[in-house]
Image: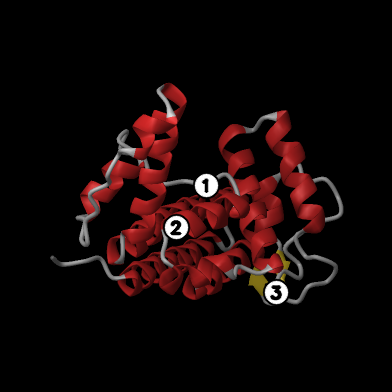
């Protein structure tokens, strides 16, 4: 049975993000000197950021599935344990103790997708803690080390990126408050990895915040580079 290679999932994500970065630079160049250059650049930054995070969520989903596809034993143990717990709660210990799981050494990737979410949605996680928790239960140690080892700085970056995406998508008071709370702590006290990616002031215009320069690069592209470096280590 041909299995999905995690390395291919990573290289695909890298290619997609690199292309989006190139697109941003091309569009920025085309806007120079136009009447609405700054306003359009703000909108471009916002749209590019949203697209980048969607790609990252898809990447995480594909990577988790790929790791389970390589070795589905941990996922099956968790699945059957949950099945037994369900039977125990609905019937009794006697019935649950007599369930004999039939494990499979190889499971097709589309079957894994159906097992995890029969609604055919991507595998998503509300934050890094949830990602780590599920990876610990579903993925064998040989493949889960990268996810388990996500650093504090990388955790803040991912969760902050998620919060910015939510505000762009929903524009709600709650999402805005959450985003600004995340932005106040993302640099972790001048942490070199996330330096310049946060703000101590409330952000009202996300596009303007993302188009601002950090060093010699637009902030939106700095976020893209951080997502790339994180993805490579998972």
- In this rendering, is residue 142 above or below 197? below
- In this rendering, is residue 16 above or below 173? below
Task: Give percent across and percent down for residue 58.
Answer: 41, 53
N-terminal of the pair, mark 2 or mark 1, is 2
- Disc 1: which residue: 125
Q: Which quarter of the figure is the N terminus placed in?
A: bottom left
Which mark is in front, 1 or 3?
1
- In this rendering, is residue 14 above or below 101? below
- Which residue occupies 80% across, 65% down? 188
Q: Does the rendering let one see residue 175?
A: yes
Task: Give percent across and percent down for residue 47.
Answer: 52, 49
- Which residue occupies 65% across, 61% down? 155
Question: Do the numbered discs 3 and 2 sit on residues whose CB atoms are within 8 Å?
Answer: no
Real-space CA distance between mark 1 and mark 3, rounded to the nearest whole angstrom:
23 Å
In front: 85, or 30? 85
Find numbered disc 2 in the image and state the secondary structure of the residue it sits on: helix
- Which residue occupies 61% across, 61% down? 220
Indicate left or right for 58 with 110 as reference: right
N-terminal of the pair, mark 1 or mark 3, is 1
N-terminal of the pair, mark 3 or mark 2, is 2
- Disc 3: which residue: 193
Q: Does the rendering let one see residue 38?
A: no
Task: Give percent across and percent down for residue 231.
Answer: 49, 69
- Disc 2: which residue: 60
Task: Give percent across and percent down for residue 125.
Answer: 52, 47
Report crowding for label 1: few under 14, some 14 to 19, many 20 or more residues within 10 A (C-alpha): some
Question: Do the numbered discs 2 and 1 sit on residues whose CB atoms are within 8 Å?
Answer: yes
Which mark is in front, 3 or 2?
2
Report crowding for label 3: few under 14, some 14 to 19, many 20 or more residues within 10 A (C-alpha): some
Real-space CA distance between mark 2 and mark 1, rounded to the nearest whole angstrom:
9 Å
Find numbered disc 1 in the image and state the secondary structure of the residue it sits on: loop
């Amino acid at each position: 049975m041909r299995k999905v290679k995690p390395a291919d999932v990573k290289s695909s994500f890298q290619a997609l993000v690199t292309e989006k970065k190139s697109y941003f630079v091309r569009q920025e160049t085309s806007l120079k000197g136009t009447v609405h250059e700054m306003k359009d650049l703000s909108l471009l930054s916002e749209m590019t950021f949203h697209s980048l995070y969607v790609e990252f969520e898809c990447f995480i989903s594909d990577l988790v599935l790929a790791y389970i596809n390589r070795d589905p034993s941990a996922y099956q143990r968790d699945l059957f344990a949950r099945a037994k717990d369900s039977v125990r709660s609905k019937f009794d210990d006697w019935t649950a103790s007599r369930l004999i799981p039939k494990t499979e050494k190889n499971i097709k990737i589309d079957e894994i997708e159906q097992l995890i979410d029969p609604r055919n949605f991507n595998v998503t996680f509300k934050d890094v803690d949830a990602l780590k928790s599920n990876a610990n239960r579903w993925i064998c140690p040989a493949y889960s080390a990268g996810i388990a080892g996500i650093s504090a700085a990388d955790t803040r970056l991912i969760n902050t990126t998620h919060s910015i995406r939510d505000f762009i998508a929903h524009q709600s008071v709650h999402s805005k408050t959450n985003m600004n709370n995340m932005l106040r702590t993302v640099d972790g006290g001048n942490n070199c990895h996330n330096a310049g990616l946060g703000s101590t002031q409330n952000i009202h215009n996300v596009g303007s915040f993302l188009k601002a320069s950090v060093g010699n690069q637009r902030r939106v592209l700095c976020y893209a580079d951080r997502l790339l470096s994180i993805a490579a280590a998972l």
